[in-house]
Image (cartoon, grey):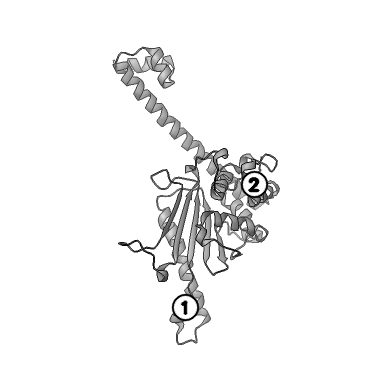
Amino acid sequence: MNKVNPKIDLVFKKLFGSEENKDILLSLINAILPISQQVAKIILKNPYNVSDYAEGKLSILDIKAEGEDGRLFDIEMQIRGSKYYGKRALFYWAKIFSSQLDYVLDESQDNDNTFEVGYSDLKKCIVISLMDFNFFDDTKYYRFYTLKDGETHEQHKDLDYLDLYFIELKKYKGKLQNLNTTLERWITFLNNAHKYDNKTLPKELAEIKEIRKASQKLDAMYLDEKEKGYYESQQKFWLDQNTLMKEVVEQAELNKQMEIAKNAIRKGTDNEFIADITGLTIEQIEQLRNETK
């Protein structure tokens, strides 16, 4: 079993945001992007550096990268849900997009056409959010947003500078034997990596060489004391959230079965039959009978 959980943002950045693991990050990015937008190679703009954490920069855990064509990527793993997460993603995009102009303006202060040069140099920005919580009110686990004409839905090349991808990890319910795409394999790995080590990694995942490498890197990953302290606090939050969610689901199911039992009692159904169809105990059913008298 892997010692660390890649859903914890520090581990995610240490795994996908290190220079020696750029091939892993590239595989994940291309698994998310459409075929027509694949990236051949990337440059890490803020590679993982343990000294950053010694300087108290534990909150800066997104991964910034640049494609060979100049496209800018911001990739984040997030376990803390928020009703404002959509606005957060848009803010991240706006910050990255506008920071390009700041840089160009600083570099061309003596140029009479500063703004023209700056705007012409702007590159497309893509925000990828991997979310270990449910944000949208449906069962879709993959979403892609971009700018299109509100009437014709056409995309103009001069406005094609914004892409937002949302991957809701908990919504993916695929089975190992039914995996079809590289993205499905990456999601399955991220959802279950803490259960596997390199020897027990399922063959359905191991057939992707970058997933094999990711598993090996997680097996060997070392956290110093400061990293470990941060990791353990985030892991505790993750475990608490998952436990709470499980309890909520179980309570909702219990409430549903109790409502079925109440309806059956009103219709004169016997205890044994109600127990068979609801899974409730005879004692629970008798208590419901007393409450419905």
Residue 207: mark in rendering: 2
Taking depth in this image into account, of 119 and 39 the one nearest to the observer is 39
Compared with 71, 242 (above or below) is: above
Circle 2 crowding by C-alpha within 10 Å: few under 14, some 14–19, many from 20: few
Q: Residue 92, percent across and down?
A: 46, 61
The residue pinned by badge 1 equals 118
Q: CA distance from mark 1 to mark 2?
A: 44 Å
SS of the residue under disc 1: helix
Circle 1 crowding by C-alpha within 10 Å: few under 14, some 14–19, many from 20: some
In the image, what residue type sits under mark 1?
Answer: Gly
**21 lies left or right of 86:** right
Res 7 seen here: no
In the image, what residue type sits under mark 2?
Answer: Glu
State the image quarter where residue 270 is shown.
top left
**Nearer to us: label 1 or label 2:** 2
Q: Residue 95, percent across and down?
A: 46, 66
Compared with 125, 137 (above or below) is: above
Res 276 seen here: yes
State the image quarter where residue 275 is shown.
top left
N-terminal label among 1 and 2? 1
Q: Residue 101, percent across and down?
A: 47, 74
Total residue callouts: 2
Taking depth in this image into account, of 189 and 202 the one nearest to the observer is 202
Query: Which part of the image, by quadrant, shows the C terminus?
Result: top left
Which residue is depicted at the point 44% across and 64% down?
A: 162
Which residue is depicted at the point 66% across and 58% down?
A: 50
SS of the residue under disc 2: loop
Q: Residue 100, percent across and down?
A: 49, 72
